[in-house]
Amino acid sequence: MKALATIMGIIAPATAFAASGASEEGNGIFVWIFLGFFAVIVVGQLIPAVMLITGLVKGITAKTVVKAEDK
């Protein structure tokens, strides 16, 4: 139990110093990877949405052809 307390006493200050240094450096590589992944998801959702809207507009604006048999 004493060894566990000693290890936790050594690790806790080390993690505090590691966390304080990250804010001084600015955005790291993992932030940019996360933002890039987020952008890929957004673009992946926009492509089907644009295709759906263009199909909807084409369907609304298309002229209906009346067959001669229907008259």
Image (tube, rainbow, N blue to C red):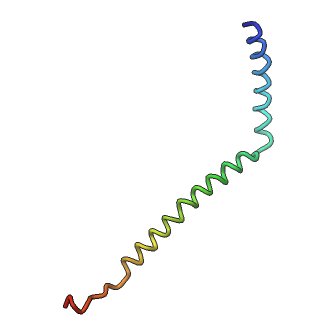
Name which residue lies at 24% across and 92% down.
68
Which quarter of the picture shows residue 23? top right
Q: Which x, y percent locates residue 24?
A: 79, 39
- Image position of 61 (left or right of 41): left
Residue placed most toward the observer, 16 or 30: 30
Image vertical order of residue 46 relative to residue 3, above or below: below
Residue 13: x and y, percent? 78, 22
Q: Nearer the viewer, residue 25 or 47?
A: 47
Give the farthest residue toward the top.
2
Screen quadrant of the N terminus: top right
Tell me which residue sits at (64%, 52%) in the image.
Answer: 37
Where, by quadrant of the figure, is residue 41 drawn?
bottom right
Q: Is residue 57 left or right of residue 35?
A: left
Q: Position of residue 44 (x, y in %)?
A: 56, 60
Say left or right for 59 vs 6.
left
Residue 42's place in the image compared with 28, above or below, is below
| Image spot of residue 60 (x, y percent) | 36, 77
Is residue 53 depicted above or below 28 in this figure?
below
Q: Write the residue at 70% across / 50% down.
A: 33
